[in-house]
Image (cartoon, rainbow, N blue to C red):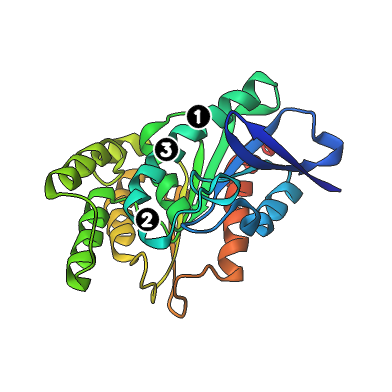
Amino acid sequence: MIIIEKELIGQIPVLHLGEQTTFNQELPLIIFIHGFQSAKEHNLHYAYLLAEKGFRVLLPDVIHHGEREAGLSDSQMMPLFWEMVLQTIQDLSLLKDDLLSRKLIDPDRIGVAGTSMGGIVTNGALAAYEWISAGVSLMGNPSYVAYAELQMEEIKKRKVDFPATDEEVAKVIEQLKPFDLSLNQDKLCDRPLLFWHGAKDPVVPYQHAYRFYEEVKAGYDEAEEKIDFILDPRAGHKVSREGVLKAADWFAKHLLSAVQNA
């Protein structure tokens, strides 16, 4: 039986899932991050499938979302997008350290995944942390600087009031560079990474991620099975059931199979 516990780790509300019979043992960990204007509960289907396969799963609320929301409007949330991404990358380390201190996870088998903003976080976390063993980016983008510039172009086209000067925007973009996986491809270090994207996605266009995939896959040499890109020609900004299942299978293959076959 899969159990779900609500916890507060630091100031981060999480849902904590795992198989009941092994819940207090050291298990491989998946941290799954939700999208912009979503919440941790909305990804329970991913967590359940992963827990069934033998993973411990954490679903955290991103700052200003879910139990951490502060009543901000849509127009107030959007300018905070990259601040929320970078804060969530920091939160991942806190979550991991807490579970390690409780001897609940195998430090050599930690995966990070997410949808949309959560997929963007996943890519930045791979640039930031060596302790992540594998990742799944669902509708995410590894090219932080290019995507931030695209966002600003769209805002200017729509002539929407944006409460930041050009100097402030330039400062944010500078802060993004260390987390931009496309600018720090060496940080990937042949770790397993799966991209899933809808070809018709109007929110996070797939082209940046696909270009990155094309650039790095050659460097995987004899480990090409560790990187893959699934482009669904019919999908928009919503992960198909096939994408959900592929995400769970990816972690099972790369974080469980190697140990089971050792």
Please rate how many residues cluster around mark 1, counting C-alpha atoms within 10 Å: few if below 14, some from 14 to 19, many from 20. Answer: some
User: Residue 208's spot in the image, x, y percent?
Assistant: 28, 59
Could you say which quadrant of the image residue 72 lies in? bottom left
Query: 110 or 162: nearer the eye?
Result: 162
Query: 204 or 82: nearer the eye?
Result: 82
Which residue bears the numbered disc 3? 87
Work out which residue is located at the far left of the displayed protein and give it.
167
**CB contact under 8 Å: marks 2 and 3:** no
Q: Is residue 67 left or right of residue 131?
A: right
Circle nearer the N terminus (2, 3): 2
Please rate how many residues cluster around mark 3, counting C-alpha atoms within 10 Å: few if below 14, some from 14 to 19, many from 20. Answer: few
The C terminus - image quarter? top right
Q: Identify the residue at horizontal 42%, vertical 37% (top origin).
A: 87
Which residue bears the numbered disc 2? 76
Q: Is residue 126 left or right of residue 1?
A: left
Q: Point out the frontmost of discs 3 and 1.
A: 3
Which residue bears the numbered disc 1? 93
Distance from Cα at disc 2 to Cα at disc 1: 27 Å
User: Residue 80's spot in the image, x, y percent?
Assistant: 35, 49
Image height of 229 relative to 25, above or below: below
Question: In the rendered image, is residue 172 in sight?
Answer: yes
Which residue type does callout 3 highlight?
Gln
Which residue type does callout 1 highlight?
Ser
Could you say which quadrant of the image residue 156 lies in? bottom left
